[in-house]
Amino acid sequence: MNRIFASMAMVFGVLFAYGCGPSVHRNPVPQDLVYQAHVSGLEEYRFIGEDGIVRDMRATLARLNQAKSSVVSFDEWKKPIRILSISGGGQNGAYGAGVLAGWSASGTRPSFQFVTGISTGALTAPFAFLGSDYDDVLKRVYTTYDTKDFVQKKGLLGALTSDSMLRVKGLTSVIHEYVTDELVASLGQAHRDGRRLWVGTTNLDANEPTYWCISGIASTDVPNRVELIRMILLASASIPVGFPPVYFEVEAGGKTYDEMHVDGGVANQVFVYPLTVDIQALIEGVLGQPLDDPKVYVIRNSRLLPQWTATEPRLLPIASRAMSSLIGTQGVGDLYQIYLGCVRDEMDFNLAIIPDSFDKKYDQEFDPVYMQALFDLGYEKAKNGYAWDKLPPDYVLDVEQVKRSQK
């Protein structure tokens, strides 16, 4: 999340919490029906909270085992397992895009059985999931657009009487341009081949993360699946207060309601699978053998060490700095969770981050010059064989101690 949007989320949420009526008429899901709510026809492809993913993984694998894998092919999971997780980070997503393109140029980029994305990582994830043929799309998105191509400011009155400070017609148009019927058909085919693409949003009413299996939605015959996938990607990148929320029509208790979703980074900056899942045991129950050489790759579109700056003694700079610190700390915590899960489940952990030596400044929130420099940096580092970090930042805990504590 960038500094202007962070300021909006912190400051305007406080300043205008009173007295400004909503411009959107809502029919929110009642509290007692939150976990029954579903998008019609997609009950098995979205879940509120990590517990939903756990239940789904167990139920799905049980069905597959009973059906002798006739429902979904798991041949992909008999290959060396490669999982990719892409974090949020706004325009810093250019770094991850460069890493992916450079990885392709190195000739060593694998096909991923499982890809996840949050915020800008959600916008990247479908193209990363489908492979190197989409590297040029990622380069265009992250190097040729600027702020005015994505967002437009509202007037003060319009902002104070609506659900956001900005209009996102431009970003919506870009998503529509690249998330086509053909792309969605390819995502659906990959799902039928046994691969999975997951994206996270935040359900503000429930105050919990929501996880959407984009590849699964793409594999259905739901008539509005293409538009729904576009909405999910937009929601995952919709920074609260700055960007308008995305409203999803859902059903619960025989009635129709709406859910308000915003940036997945509000709940977590990056995710792979819940720590409550022993994925080795689950998959082995279907395959009859352990996962083959599992590797987890995490692309963190941010620097991790604190970045010093002299904060001005004014409300907006203080709010922006505080929110930036909060998000950065949350992102590090997410990496520790993923790493500890990898240690427990005997998966090889690999982390790519923006080096702290990159000190180029940007002139706007989506600065094509800045993004081109970041893309080029990621590209060159990956083209020459990326030196993946094997530990989260400042990690000192003994790995064998972690393994022993899980037994």
Image (tube, helix red, strand yellow):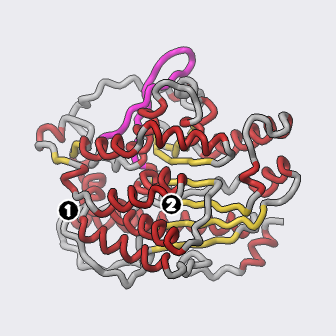
Q: Residue furthest top?
A: 254
Q: Position of residue 358 (x, y in %)?
A: 35, 81
Earlier in the chain: of badge 1 and badge 2, it is 2
Q: Any magenta on residue 249?
A: yes
- Where disc 1 sits, the SS reads helix
328, 225: nearer the viewer:
225
Find residue 398 and report its image quarter. bottom right
In the rendered image, the quadrant that contains the N terminus is bottom left
Which segment is the magenta one? 244-263
Numbered circle sitting on residue 352: none
The location of residue 283, given as percent across then percent down, is 79, 51
At a point 61% along the width and 45% down the height, the residue shown is 190
Mark 2 neighbour class, 10 Å CA radius: few under 14, some 14 to 19, many 20 or more? many
- In the rendered structure, the answer to whether residue 255 lies left or right of residue 174 reads right
Residue 179 lies within the magenta run: no
Residue on which disc 1 sits? 315
| Type of amino acid at the residue the image marks with label 1 | Leu
In the picture of the structure, the residue carrying the numbered disc 2 is 132
